[in-house]
Amino acid sequence: MHISLKTILVLSILVLSCAAQAEPQVSPALIQQFKAMSPGEQSAIAKQYGFELPKAAKDNVMETLAKPAEALPQSEKKIEAQVEQSKSKNVLERFGRSLFQKSVSTFAPTDNALVPNDYRIGVGDELVVQLFGKDNSLTSLQVGRDGVINFPKLGPISVAGLSFDEAQSLVRTRVATQFIGVDAVVSMGRLRAMNIFMAGEVSVPGAYSVSALTTITQALFQAGGVTDIGSLRNIQVKRGGKLVATFDVYDLLLKGDISNDIRLQSGDVVFVPPYKRLVTVMGEVKRPMVYEVVDDELLGDMIEMSGGYKSSAFAGELVIIKKREAGELPEVLNIRAGDEQSLRMPMSNGDVVRVLPLGDNVENNISMEGALSRPGTFGWKPGLRVSDLISDARRDLQADADVNYSLIVREVGDNLDVEVLQFRLADVLTRAGTEGDPLLKARDRVLVFSVETTTQINEELQAVDLEDSNRRSVMLKPLIEKLRAQAVSGKPSLIATISGAVKAPADYPLGSSFTVSDLLSAAGGTDDSAFIQQIEVRRMQELANGNMRAEVLNIAFDEIGDFVLKPMDFVTVKRKANWGVQEKVSLKGEVLYPGDYILMPGETLKDLLQRAGGFTREAFVEGAIFTRLTVKALEEQQARKFAADIKRSLASSMITQEQSKASELSAMNEVINTLSDYEGKGRLVIDLKRALIGDAAANLEMQEGDVLMIPKRPHSIAVVGEVRQPGAHLFDGELSLADYLSLSAGTTARSDDENVYVVRASGAVVRPEGSLTRFVRADVRLQPGDTIVVPVNTGYQDDLPFWRDVTQVIYQGVVTIAAISNLGM
C-alpha cells in the first residue's frame, strides 16, 4: 500500500513537470505526505520508477500542489461568479466572506515561517544541526516514529514532546559534553505534516494534510472559506471530541486580534456551523454590507461594525425594518440616533438598518442661480440685500445678464408654497440700499436671466436653446409647475401669459401688484414688429353662478405701467400689419439679372421677369423650368398615399391567401419603400410666352419658394426608350419624328408603336394621334430640346413560346385522332 501511494504521487508530479493537459487529481493529504519526505527520498522514489525529477520542476510542482484539491479552484470560480452576480444586482455582500474568495490566493505554505520557541517537536519533524569548531558539518535529522533523532557519533536523542527551545538546549548540551571544542546551532528543517478535518459549512469539506504550524485561518484558506450559510463568528476547534477553542473572524477583520487563531494539532476538527443572525446595514455608512451578529450585539454595535456614518449621512435618525414573528409583516421603526437607549436595541435575523442621506437642505442660505459669474449657495444674515451679493456688474454678472428682469423665489407657510418678487438688477447696481434693492430672507432663491436675443417672428417657431440653462424657459419651468401645483379652489395659480411681438412669449409668474409693464420686462421686451399703441388683455371673470366668462380689454401703451394683472390673464402684443412678410423667389439661368428676389404683394411671373431685366440672347423661353414648393409637397403626399394603397392591397392579398411569388413580394416591397421615400421635384408646366404677353391664365401669381430656371437654347433632339440606338441628334427642321426614329436604328420588338409621345423642353407632353405608320402623313412639329419617348409594350410576348405551344396542341390533336382511328379499326 505504501509503494502504491508513492507511485501515485510520483506519477502526478511527473505529469505536471512534463506539461500535460490534465490537472492531477491528488488529495491534500498525499501532497503533504510527499512534502514531508526529504529531497533525497523524493528523488529516490522518482528514480525507482525510471524518472529523473528536476529540481526546478519539483519546486514548481510543490507550489502548484500546495492547493488542497482540484475542487478548490472550481469552488473559488463559482464563488467569484456569485459575488460578481450579486454586485451586478446591487445586492450587498456579507462582510468577511471575501477574505477567502480571492481569485488570486493570499495563502502560502508555512514551511518557511518562523518556528516559535514553544513549538512541540513531533514525529516527522526535521532538525538541522550546524557544527563548527574542530568539526564543521551540517546534519539534517528527522524525528523517527520512536520520537528520537539519530545523531552521528552521538547516538539517539529523544526529542518528541519537547518544545523547540528545549530541544535546542538538549542538543547543544550533548554536543558540548561529548565533543570538545565543538559548538552547535540547531534550527528547524522541514516540518511534519499532520491531518485535520474541515467540517460543517466550508466550501470544500474533508480531510486535509497540513503543516504543523497551520492555524484556523490558514485551514479555512485551504478549504476555500465558508459557504453562503456558514458562520464567520463561531468557528469551532474540537480536539478529542471536546471544544477547545472558538474563533471570530470579525476580531481579525475589525480589531486585528488573532489571539484566538490557535495552531491546530493532528486530529483536530475545524467545524463551521450555520450562521444564526444576519443584519443588513445600508445607506450612508462607510461600509454598507450584511453583517453577522452574535447574541450580545446591539444596534450601536452595527453602526460601529459598518465603519460609522459618512459625512453625507443624516445621523439624527435611522430607519429600522424590524423582523417580527413568523407570519407577521416586518415593522418599520424610526430611531433617534442620539438616543443611547435606542442604540441598545437588540438585533434579530433579517433586520435592516438604513442610514438616510443628509440631502441638500441647509439653514440660513441664499441660492444664487443663472447668468452670474459665481452662482451657488451663500450664507444669509439679517439685513442682507441683493447688493451685498451683486455689487459690480463686470465682476459679478455674465456678459449676457438681463439687468431689467430678475426674480426672488421665497418660501411661505408650512406647506412650503412659494411666492415671487420681481426686481431690476439695474436698480440694485445704481441704488443700493433703497427700495429697489430688495431685502433677502433665509432660503431665498435669486434668479438672474440671460438677455433674450431671438426675435419671435412666428409664435409657433420659438427659438429656444434647451441646452442653455440661463434661458427663461429652462429656469422658469420648475417654478411654473410649482405655482400650478399649489393652486387650490378660489386661489388660482399666480401665472400670466404673454404672446405676440415679444422676445420670449411664455407663461410667467405673477408677483404682488404685477403690471403689464412688468410682464413685458419678463418677456424680454417687445421686438421691432410690435404694435405698441394698444395691447390686448384677455381676462376670465367668474360670474355669480360660478361660470367663467372671458372679456377682452384694450390697454393703451401709456397705461401699461398702471394696469395690474390677475391670475390667468392672457396678454397679446400685436404685430404691425404686413410686418416681416418677406416671401423670397429665385430666378436662375438666362435672365439679365438672376438671383433671389423679395416679392411685392400680388406680384406675377411677368412682373418678376421685368424686374430681372428680361432674357439674354441665349435664353430658351420654351424650355423654362418652374418649380413650386406646394407642388413638391403634393407630389410627395401622393407618392406616400400610393405606397399606402399598394401596402394595403398587398396585405389584403395575403389575408385572402392569393398566391404570390417571393420575388414578386420583394419587388412590391421595393416599390413601396421607393414611393415612401420619394422626394418630389415640384415642377409645374407653364407657358411662359403666353404669360409675357399678358394672358391672365398663364401669368400666375408668384409664391414663397418659387424657382424659375431659363436654360440656354438647345440644338438637339433626344430619342429614348425602346429604340435600338438611344441618343441625341442635332436638330433639323426638315426631319420628321419618323426620321429621328430611323436615325436611332428604329424601334425594338418590344416597343409600343401606338403610344409614342414627345416631351417638350417646358415639360409639356405631345402625343400624336394614329399609329407610327401615319406619323409620316400627320406628323407633330418637332422643336429644339424635344425628347422622343418610345415606351415598352407591356403586352409583348416572345413568338417562340407561342409557336411552341401551338405545335404542342397540334401534335396532341394528331395523336388523339390516330388513337380514335385505331379504335375504329
Image: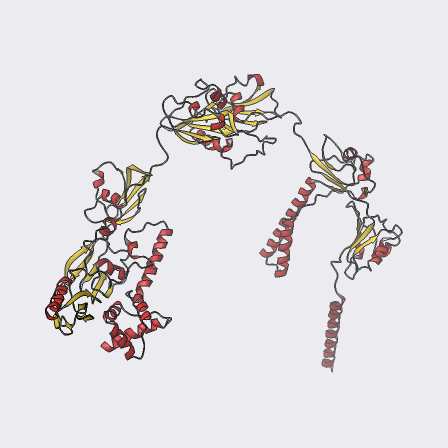
Extreme-bottom residue of the structure? 825
Residue 775 horizontal side relative to residue 166, left or right: right
Extreme-left residue of the structure? 177
Figure colour scheme = secondary structure
The residue lying toward the viewer, choosing from 173 and 721, is 173
Look at the image and tell me in which quarter the C terminus lies.
bottom right
Q: What residue is drawn where x is 86% and y is 57%?
A: 773
Name above or below for residue 126 compared with residue 823: above
Would you identify the image quadrant in which residue 156 lies?
bottom left
Q: Report if residue 125 is visible in the image.
A: no
Query: Residue 189 location in percent, x, y?
Result: 21, 66
Residue 573 horizontal side relative to residue 304, left or right: right
Residue 52 horizontal side relative to residue 131, left or right: right
Q: Report if residue 324 is visible in the image.
A: yes
Name above or below for residue 819 compared with residue 551: below
Would you identify the image quadrant in which residue 198 lies?
bottom left
Name above or below for residue 529 compared with residue 29: above
Would you identify the image quadrant in which residue 512 lies?
top left
Look at the image and tell me in which quarter the N terminus lies.
bottom left
Query: Residue 237 location in percent, x, y?
Result: 18, 59
Query: Residue 721 location in percent, x, y?
Result: 77, 56
Q: What residue is drawn where x is 34% and y is 54%?
A: 83
Query: Residue 777 location in percent, x, y?
Result: 89, 53
The residue lying toward the viewer, choosing from 823 and 503, is 503
